[in-house]
Image (spheres, rainbow, N blue to C red):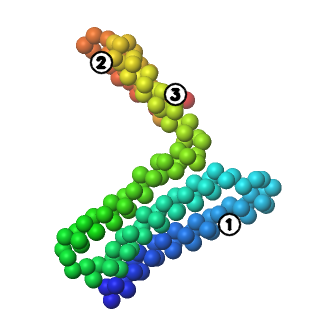
């Protein structure tokens, strides 16, 4: 039973991802056609690339579990297992690059945050005052002298 269960455990998640991705694409196309809008390929490409990255990263783990009963060498077993699980973790890392390549608003968000961090670092090193603005609020940090003050204003407090 172990090879059958291992095969199911590795195949079923991929099938679920493929089916739900296809369903989301068809649903998005129907909704945009009804509304008379154009299909937003940016979002569709993000969904497709994320699903493909997951399926490709999960395949080696599935292969490992299918072949696991036949692996006799303990060293090969350990290295094969580690390698397949490391490849699975690549999926998490690829999401950042997929979003960076396909989502313009994510790229703009990264640019803004990088600029803010750069200005904050330069302001703090210079002994002056740096103001970091964010989605959740503003943070002002003063480093003049020995007294360092920090205040955080949330969006709700400002409104």
User: Answer yes or no: do the residues labelled 1 and 3 have beta carbons within 8 Å?
Assistant: no
Q: Residues within 10 Å of mark 2 (few under 14, many from 20)?
A: few
Q: Is residue 115 above or below residue 13?
A: above
- Circle 3 residue: 158
Disc 2 target residue: 148
Q: Residues within 10 Å of mark 1 (few under 14, many from 20)?
A: few
Q: Which x, y percent locates residue 54?
A: 47, 63
Q: Who's the residue at 67% across and 53% down the image?
A: 41
Q: Is residue 127 above or below residue 104?
A: above
Q: CA distance from mark 1 to mark 3?
A: 42 Å
Q: Earlier in the sequence, mark 1 or mark 3?
A: 1
Query: Can residue 138 be seen at all in this image of the molecule?
Result: no
Image coordinates for residue 145, horizontal then vertical, percent: 28, 10
Please tell me how crowded label 3 is: few (under 14), some (14-19), or many (20+) other residues with Cα within 10 Å.
few
Q: Residue 96, how many percent across, how many down? A: 47, 48
Comparing labels 1 and 3, the label whose residue is closer to the camera:
1
Whether residue 44 sits left or right of residue 131 in the image: it is right
Instruction: Say which label, 2 or 3, has the lower sequence index.
Output: 2
**Which residue corresponds to mark 1?**
26
Quarter occupied by the C terminus: top right
Label drawn at residue 116: none
Image-based side of 139 in relation to 108, left or right: left
């Amino acid at each position: 039973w172990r090879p059958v269960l291992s095969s199911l455990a590795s195949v079923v998640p991929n099938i679920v991802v493929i089916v739900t991705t296809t369903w989301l694409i068809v649903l998005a196309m129907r909704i945009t056609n009804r509304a008379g809008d154009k299909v937003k390929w940016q979002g569709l490409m993000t969904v497709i690339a994320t699903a493909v990255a997951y399926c490709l990263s999960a395949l080696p783990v599935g292969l490992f579990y299918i072949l696991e009963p036949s692996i006799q060498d303990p060293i090969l077993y350990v290295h094969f297992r580690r390698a397949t699980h490391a490849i699975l973790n690549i999926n998490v890392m690829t999401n950042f690059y997929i979003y960076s390549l396909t989502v313009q608003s994510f790229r703009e968000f990264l640019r803004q945050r990088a600029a803010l961090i750069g200005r904050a670092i330069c302001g703090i090193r210079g002994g002056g005052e740096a103001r970091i603005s964010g989605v959740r609020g503003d943070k002002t940090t003063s480093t003049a002298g020995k007294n360092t003050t920090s205040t955080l204003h949330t969006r709700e407090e400002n409104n």
